[in-house]
C-alpha cells in the first residue's frame, strides 16, 4: 500500500500485470484498476485518452483514487511521457504502476522515484516449476473445465524444467498445458510422449 509509483520489470509472460493487480488489491481494491497498453498512441490521442474530450471522461478521471497500469510504459513518445510526468507532479490521487522490459528505468522517462520490482524469467525459477504447473492446472479447472488432466509425470516434469522458456515464459507454459489438456480431455496424467514435439525435439538435441 502507498502512493509512490511502482515499476515492474520483467520479460513478457513473467506475470507483470498479475503483480500489478495484487499490489492494487493491497490498498485500493475498492477503486478501479485501469489497464493501458502504451504502444501505438499518437501524442494527441494519448492526451485525449488521459484527460478526455467533449463529454467523454479520460482515464485519469475514470481511475480516480485507483491504479492506472501502464503496460510497457517505455513505448510512450517523449511528449506522452511528459503527460505522465505532469500527472505525477499534480495532486491527483491516481497511483501509477508501470511495466517494462529489463534495462529500462521509468524514472529516466517520467522523473520521480519509482519503487522497482523485478520478476525473473521462468528459466531462472526452475525450483518453482512443479508448483507453477500444479497451480496452472487448478486454475484451468476453474476457467475451462471439461478435461481430466490433474498432474504431470515426473519424467515429463523434468523435461519441462529443462526447457529454456524464452518467448512468453509463464504464458508459454500455460499455453502448452491448455493445449495438452484440451487435446486429450480424458487424460489424467501428462507423460513424456504427450509433450509437444517442439519440446521433445529440443530435449533430444541436448542429450
Image (cartoon, grey):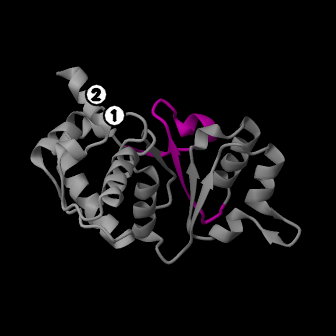
Instruction: Give the residue drawn at x 25%, y 53%.
Output: 132
Image x and y of residue 105, in percent: 52, 35
Q: Is residue 31 above or below residue 107?
A: below
Q: Quadrant of the C terminus?
A: top left
Instruction: Give the residue drawn at x 73%, y 58%.
Output: 50
Image x and y of residue 162, in percent: 21, 33
Q: Is residue 161 above or below residue 177?
A: above
Instruction: Give the residue drawn at x 20%, y 47%.
Output: 128
Looking at the rendered structure, which numbered label has been put on residue 198?
Answer: 1
Residue bounds of the magenta highlight? 91-118
Q: Is residue 103 magenta?
A: yes
In the rendered image, is residue 2 in sight?
yes
Q: Is residue 86 left or right of residue 124?
A: right
Q: Is residue 132 left or right of residue 47?
A: left
Quadrant hosting residue 187: bottom left
Q: Quadrant of the N terminus?
A: bottom left
**SS state under label 2:** helix
Looking at the image, how many numbered discs can be counted on the residues?
2
- Residue under label 2: 202
Amino acid at each position: 500500500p502507498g502512493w509512490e509509483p511502482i515499476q515492474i520489470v520483467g520479460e513478457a509472460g513473467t506475470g507483470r500485470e498479475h503483480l500489478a493487480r495484487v499490489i492494487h488489491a493491497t490498498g485500493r481494491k475498492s477503486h478501479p484498476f485501469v489497464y493501458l497498453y502504451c504502444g501505438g498512441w499518437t501524442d494527441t490521442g494519448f492526451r485525449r485518452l488521459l484527460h478526455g474530450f467533449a463529454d467523454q471522461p479520460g482515464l485519469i478521471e475514470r481511475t480516480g483514487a485507483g491504479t492506472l497500469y501502464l503496460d510497457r510504459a517505455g513505448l510512450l513518445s517523449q511528449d506522452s511521457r511528459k503527460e505522465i510526468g505532469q500527472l505525477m507532479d499534480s495532486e491527483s490521487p491516481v497511483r501509477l504502476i508501470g511495466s517494462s522490459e529489463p534495462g529500462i528505468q521509468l524514472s529516466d522517462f517520467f522523473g520521480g522515484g519509482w519503487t522497482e520490482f523485478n520478476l525473473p524469467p521462468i528459466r531462472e525459477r526452475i525450483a518453482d516449476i512443479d508448483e507453477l504447473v500444479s497451480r496452472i492446472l487448478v486454475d484451468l479447472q476453474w476457467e475451462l473445465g471439461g478435461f481430466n488432466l490433474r498432474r504431470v509425470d515426473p519424467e515429463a516434469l523434468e523435461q519441462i524444467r529443462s526447457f529454456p522458456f524464452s518467448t512468453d515464459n509463464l504464458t508459454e507454459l500455460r499455453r502448452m498445458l491448455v493445449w495438452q489438456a484440451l487435446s486429450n480431455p480424458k487424460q489424467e496424467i501428462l507423460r513424456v510422449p504427450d509433450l509437444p514435439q517442439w519440446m521433445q525435439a529440443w530435449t533430444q538435441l541436448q542429450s
